[in-house]
Image: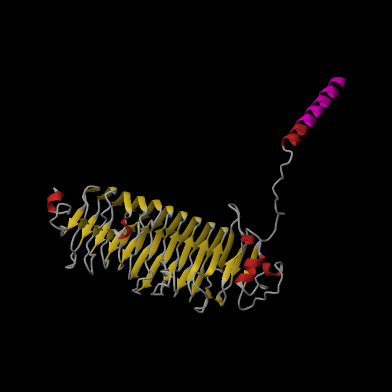
Amino acid sequence: MKNNFFVVTSLSLLLLSFYACKKEDNAGVVPPVVPPAGVVKTFYVSTATGDDSRTAEQTKKASTPWKTIQKAANSVPGGSTVIIAGGTYVEKVSIPTSCNGTPTERTVFRNKENESVVLDGKNTGSQYEGLFKLVGNEYVVVKGITVQNGYWYGFSGEGSKNITLDSCSTFNTRASGIYVKTSSEVTITRNNIRKACQELTRDSFGNGSQECISVVMVDGFKIANNEVWDTSQVGDAGGEGIDAKSGSNNGEIANNYVHDIARLGIYVDAGSKDQFNVRVHSNRVFNTGGMSVAGEIGGHVHEIYFYNNVVKDSKSSGLTFQAIGNGKYTNVYVVNNTFYNNALNGFAGDVGNYSKNTGNSNLVIRNNIFYNKISNSRFSIWHDLAQPHVISNNLYFDFKPSNNSSNSFNAAKLT
């Protein structure tokens, strides 16, 4: 009996010593706050039956919702889901940072299932204003919302991180349908962008209406499975389909359907900056100005990949390396694409490199299919400088040589 008491006593002392050490080791560490089990973080909004004087607790029931999306945004805690009933909401929405989510609990603003939510800006507002705006937000998802008649942008984001725009629509915006700048880890998927960039002229400072989907100085982005279309305006203010620009790095533009756009369908433009690691693949680009890569203000574009795209009925060339601003191109790959009946207008063909920057290097055009029966088509491949190109293993139907200069790509170089 004494031996057992000694063993138990010793064990107790050992455990007390262990926990005492653990307490000392963790001194000053604040334990995470765990919300009580069963806390409901779903809230409801309805323009038809809502009342903004209701408490947050009341609006956890679909039968007693808030009336406006903005009231919900100002009231809910981070990690909430706001379900918006069908109807037209005549308001502008700005998501405050107070409802930012976390990696494990994102804040979601979404339509009620199978109901159409329309945010109508009535074409009122100011330049650079988004009808649905995210500024400084983190881990926020916007899903299933239509914005229309925006004075400037439809959806806009700035200084944000891990934001998602999914299954939304924009219609009739003077500038971009979706415009995101100076942000990171941005996802733009399954949206329908129609009649964006309806403003045709630039302002007195030279600012234009941007592109239908624009990401500007964004690190880490995915633009996928969107339909961008019906922007027939012809002006000098903007209006390209999808543009990753001004140092937008580590991104993907994939599986989009871009069609019936007066200007370029897909654009990768460094502007004045260093831009790298952008993959443009598996897109359908029909009846647009084709695809293009540029450094419009002398920037450097490198590690850019165009592959598995179908470019059809382009008004200009299927893909161009632009000469604007004498940008520099390094390690640009144009591989496994199909170019079909492009060059409907002007001096154009399938792939044209107009750059005269002697610093260009490793521009690869390989394993593409060129089919062109358009009488206006001037060339299959055009380049002013031959040295940086690697051109091989392409399949041509009705091959068209560029010109007879020493730098042209002609039939003699096919053998």
Report the magenta stretch's main SS: helix
What percent of the width, then of the height, locates residue 196? 42, 71
Using residue 213 as the reference point, say whether residue 414 is left or right of it.
left
Residue 2 sits inside the magenta stretch: yes
**Which region is colored magenta?**
1-18
In this rendering, position of residue 387 left or right of residue 165: left
Display colour scheme: secondary structure
Q: Residue 353 versus residue 166: which sits nearer the camera?
A: 353
Q: How many marks?
A: 0
In the current view of this chain or complex, which residue is farthest to the right? Answer: 2
294 relative to 148, above or below: above
User: Which residue corresponds to the image point at 35% horizontal and 75% vertical from the top-left?
Assistant: 233
* In the displayed structure image, the side of residue 326 where residue 276 appears, left or right: right
> Which residue is painted at 33% across and 58% down in the image?
325
Instruction: Provide residue 150's location: percent of width, then percent of height.
Output: 49, 74
**In the current view of this chain or complex, which residue is farthest to the top?**
3
Residue 14 is situated, as x and y percent measured from the top left of the image, at: 78, 27
Q: Quadrant of the N terminus?
A: top right
Residue at 56 percent of width and 66 percent of height: 110
Looking at the rendering, which quadrant does residue 82 occupy?
A: bottom right
Query: Is residue 407 placed above or below 67 in the rendered structure?
Result: above
| Residue nearest the observer in this picture, 297 or 378 | 297
Percent of width and height locating residue 130:
51, 69
Residue 272 colored in magenta in the image: no
Q: Is residue 8 toward the left or the right of residue 149 in the image?
A: right
Instruction: Name the residue at 15% across, 57% down.
Output: 401
Q: Quadrant of residue 93?
A: bottom right
